[in-house]
Image (spheres, grey):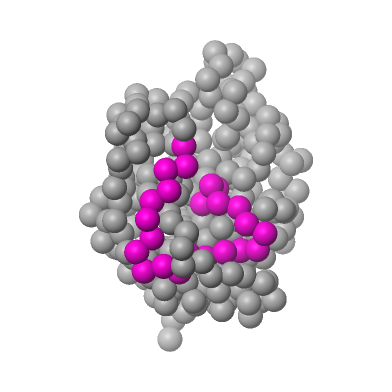
Amino acid sequence: MSTTTEVLFISHGGGPMPLLGDPGHRELVEKLTEIAGQLRRPSAILVISAHWEAAAPTITSGANPALIYDYYGFPPESYEIEYPCPGEPALARRVHQALEQAGIPARLDDRRGFDHGLFVPLKLMYPEADIPCVQLSLVDSLDAATHLAIGKALRALDTDNLLVIGSGFSFHNMQAFFAPSTPEIEARNEAFEAWLEETCADTGITEAQRAERLVHWERAPHARFCHPREEHLLPLHVCYGLAGQPSETHVSATVLGKRSGMFYWRVSR
């Protein structure tokens, strides 16, 4: 029986700011809402968040995970945000099995809650909070090839109508976000975004070349300026590892004055 999985890498914005009416996130909110309206309604959602790192890939397996307000210095209402979506223990077990069968040791965690890499974008995309969700961690080595392999292992999932979201940010230099914009900063941002779009979406690139570029992403123009630390880029590696094909759709949004990208794949197996 064939299954179809929709795969989406998103730039999720700064902490809870997309939910607080911040003008610098207006376009991001519009784009995420628009994307959700174009997707079929998923039966379940698997989120790879930039905000969870573990020694081995770890999967939330609780039936009703709490929320983790893993941000600091925001207004009181940002710590009262609710997103009471259920967990999906059966999907968590299938994710664990797929990783283990690929030779990637993994863990289930029935106590960990959902961090803001999950509940902030999903509150915009699916505000009813009625779709079961599972969250998958990054590996704290932050090795690019490892995260491509994790994505490739997820191809074994036999869950139809699954939405996989890599929740990160295609630009994540915190100092640059809040520094005065200059032509040099804009040029660096634009150059890396152009490289990323070419890498993920250009049909003239073979899949071996695409994977090689992502493994060696630090060679991209201004890579370490755009990502002083790579945790917000690596959810993209998991998404591509799962898809194994060019992205069908690229969406750009200006967030806090910086251009940020999102990528979509529809995968049938």
Which residue is located at x 71 percent, y 45 percent? 217
In this view of the protein, can residue 202 be seen by the observer? no
| Whole-percent x, y for residue 69 in the image | 42, 43
Please tell me whether residue 246 belongs to the stretch shown in magenta. no
| Whole-percent x, y for residue 48 in the image | 51, 56
Which residue is located at x 46 percent, y 32 percent? 72
119 or 43: nearer the viewer: 119
Residue 185 occupies quadrant: top right
- What is the magenta range? 49-71
Which residue is located at x 65 percent, y 43 percent? 230
Q: In this view, does 92 lie above or below 173?
A: below
Which residue is located at x 51 percent, y 66 percent? 109
Residue at the front extreme?
111
Residue at the bottom extreme?
1
- Majority secondary structure of magenta residues: loop
Is residue 88 toward the left or the right of residue 146 in the image?
Answer: left
168 or 80: nearer the viewer: 80
| Whole-percent x, y for residue 103 in the image | 69, 76
Please tell me whether residue 53 belongs to the stretch shown in magenta. yes
Is residue 139 toward the left or the right of residue 41 in the image?
Answer: right
| Whole-percent x, y for residue 157 in the image | 50, 76
Residue 229 occupies quadrant: top right
116 or 188: nearer the viewer: 116
Q: Is residue 246 above or below residue 12?
A: below
143 or 72: nearer the viewer: 72
Q: Is residue 137 above or below residue 20?
A: below
| Count of picture labels | 0
Q: In this view, does 227 lie above or below 106?
A: above
In this view of the protein, can residue 218 be seen by the observer? yes
